[in-house]
Image (cartoon, helix red, strand yellow):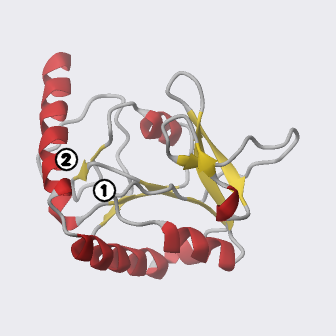
Amino acid sequence: MHGGVRAEKQRIRQEAKIISEGLTPEYRREASREITRQVLALPEWKKAATVMAYWSLPTEPDTRELMETALREGKTLLLPRCLDAGRMAALPVKDLAGVKPGTLGIPEPGTAADGTEVPDPDLILVPCMAAAPNGVRLGHGAGYYDRFLAEHTGRAICLCFRALLRGDLPTEGTDIITDLVISD
């Protein structure tokens, strides 16, 4: 059964990649704006002192405005940094200009200074390749976010283009369901 779920996830990732590559730059821009608008309107955003975001890939809803708004509003902004063994840490960022490409080529913060107290995120924005309206998400398959979410209690919100929403996502015991999926 385990192998069947993994094979099904790989098949859906391939489909999602094809759909994603077919989205026009105009659609991505408009959809990203709408997703950003919805996130900023959330009571969870308004209440959050600490927001964990991610540096979006070109195939994902653009998170730059969300990161800039968090900094402008005086929230503590955390971004993921890949560690060993498929784990990641959420480290504070004060300026997006200081973020450099990391392990996977995705911009990430440098290491935190010794003794830096990193707050637990109140709100965690989560990327996906595809998601279901019930909070099930399909990531790239490395498990970074599932391991991270298993250890943190902040509200997890998955950002997903409407074209990549689907109801048939299989899950395994290690998959963490997000609290909310926001799409255009």
Instruction: Determine the secondary structure under disc 2.
Output: helix
Q: Do callouts 2 and 1 mark residues in contact (Cβ within 8 Å)?
A: yes
Hey, what amino acid is under mark 1?
A: Thr
Task: Determine the residue positioned at 28% across, 75% down.
Answer: 31
Residue 8: x and y in percent read 13, 31
The residue labelled by disc 1 is 59
Q: Is residue 35 above or below residue 144?
A: below
Residue 23: x and y in percent read 18, 64
In this rendering, would 69 be left or right of 113? left
Camera-nearest residue between 2 and 29: 29
- Mark 1 Cα shell of 10 Å, populated few (<14), some (14-19), many (≥20): some
Q: CA distance from mark 2 to mark 1?
A: 8 Å
Q: Quadrant of the C terminus?
A: bottom left
In which image quadrant can residue 101 be found? top right
In this rendering, would 169 be left or right of 70? left
**Residue 4 showing in the rendered view:** yes
Residue 117: x and y in percent read 81, 48
Mark nearer the N terminus (2 vs 1): 2
Q: Quadrant of the N terminus?
A: top left
Camera-nearest residue between 51 and 104: 104
The residue labelled by disc 2 is 17
In which image quadrant can residue 163 be found? bottom left
Task: Determine the residue positioned at 59% across, 77% down.
Answer: 69
Can you tell which mark lies on residue 111? Answer: none
Hey, what amino acid is under mark 2?
A: Lys
Camera-nearest residue between 103 and 76: 103
Instruction: Determine the secondary structure under disc 1.
Output: loop
